[in-house]
């Protein structure tokens, strides 16, 4: 009887390990898609952008596999407490990673759209810095999940305001370019959507941080969620100037 119990426990641990490995693989792919989409936008590389868009399909497939495995594990094992939190955390994180993959794909599509445009160097530097920060946040929070490090996840959670502050600054700068010359509106609109996608990556990294904290401690973060995106209340007055 004891031998059978050991076999069940070992089998269950193997299933959890497989689930964690799929999350790690999915996270690596999400990082890759993001990094390539930023590079494609910076270099105006349509071939890299197209390859990046196609890579998102593998992320979607992994999410489906994780969902199916999680449902089977819950039905078969009927886990409780920390064991149940591990499975639910994998489900929640896979959803955020799938959305991050979609956001990376959207950024790559913007790279295709602006390939023939002359891009202002200062704007591209701001976008690049914002992208590097969001990618760093994603890597850090995925490491926090693998290591079950709630403090590390909490540090990521608090740093989301930095990405929001950069987005606010870039938003205003792009509006200025559009107001100065209507010919900039097409390019700046694409860059504005790209910047918003990067800001949303930061939000999903923050979601993952909350999930890691809950996984480790069994309770939600009690502090107010840091949020610094003020663009919704930014007054806009687009006056057409002479060309």
Image (cartoon, rainbow, N blue to C red):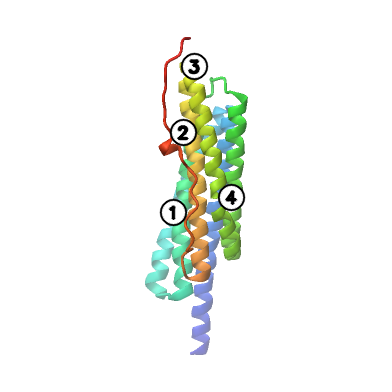
SS of the residue under disc 2: helix
Sequence-earlier tag: 3 or 1: 1
Does any portion of residue 18 appear in the rendered image? Answer: yes
Q: State the separation of the CA atoms marked 2 and 4.
A: 20 Å
Q: Position of residue 73 (x, y in %)?
A: 42, 69
Q: Give the mark toward the camera: 3 or 4.
A: 3
Residue marked by disc 4: 137
Circle 1 residue: 95
Nearest-to-viewer mark from 1 and 2? 2
Q: Is residue 130 above or below residue 111?
A: below
In-front residue for pair 69/178: 178
131 relative to 91 in the view: left or right: right
Instruction: Return the x and y of residue 9 as percentages of the image width and height.
Output: 51, 79
Residue drawn at x 48%, y 90% as measured from the top left: 1
Mark 3 Cα-neighbour bin, 10 Å: few <14, some 14–19, many ≥20: some
Q: Which residue is mark 2?
A: 193
Q: Secondary structure at mark 4?
A: helix
Q: Can residue 54 be seen here?
A: no
Q: Nearer the viewer, mark 3 or mark 1?
A: 3
- Distance in Å between CA atoms under marks 3 and 2: 19 Å
User: Alpha carbon of mark 4 to alpha carbon of mark 1: how far?
Assistant: 17 Å
| Residue at screen point 47% across, 37% down | 106
Mark 2 neighbour class, 10 Å CA radius: few under 14, some 14 to 19, many 20 or more:
some
Calculate the distance from the C-alpha at mark 1 to the C-alpha at mark 2.
22 Å
Mark 1 secondary-structure assignment: helix
């Amino acid at each position: 009887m004891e031998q059978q119990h050991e076999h069940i426990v070992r089998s269950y641990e193997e299933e959890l390990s497989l689930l964690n490995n799929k999350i790690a693989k999915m996270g690596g792919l999400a990082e890759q898609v993001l990094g390539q989409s930023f590079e494609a936008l910076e270099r105006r590389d349509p071939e890299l952008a197209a390859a990046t868009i196609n890579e998102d399909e593998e992320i979607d497939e992994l999410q489906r596999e994780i969902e199916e495995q999680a449902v089977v594990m819950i039905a078969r094992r009927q886990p409780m407490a920390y064991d149940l939190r591990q499975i639910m955390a994998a489900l929640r994180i896979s959803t955020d990673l799938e959305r991050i993959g979609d956001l990376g794909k959207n950024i790559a599509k913007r790279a295709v759209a602006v390939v023939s445009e002359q891009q202002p160097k200062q704007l591209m530097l701001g976008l690049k810095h914002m992208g590097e920060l969001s990618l760093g946040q994603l890597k850090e929070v995925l490491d926090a999940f693998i290591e079950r490090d709630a403090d590390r996840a909490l540090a990521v959670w608090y740093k989301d305001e930095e990405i929001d502050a950069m987005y606010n600054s870039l938003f205003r700068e792009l509006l200025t370019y559009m107001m100065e010359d209507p010919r900039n509106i097409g390019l700046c609109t694409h860059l504005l959507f790209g910047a918003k996608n990067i800001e949303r990556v930061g939000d999903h990294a923050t979601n993952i941080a909350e999930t890691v904290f809950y996984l480790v401690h069994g309770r939600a973060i009690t502090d107010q969620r840091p949020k610094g995106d003020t663009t919704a209340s930014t007054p806009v007055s687009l006056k057409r100037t002479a060309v």
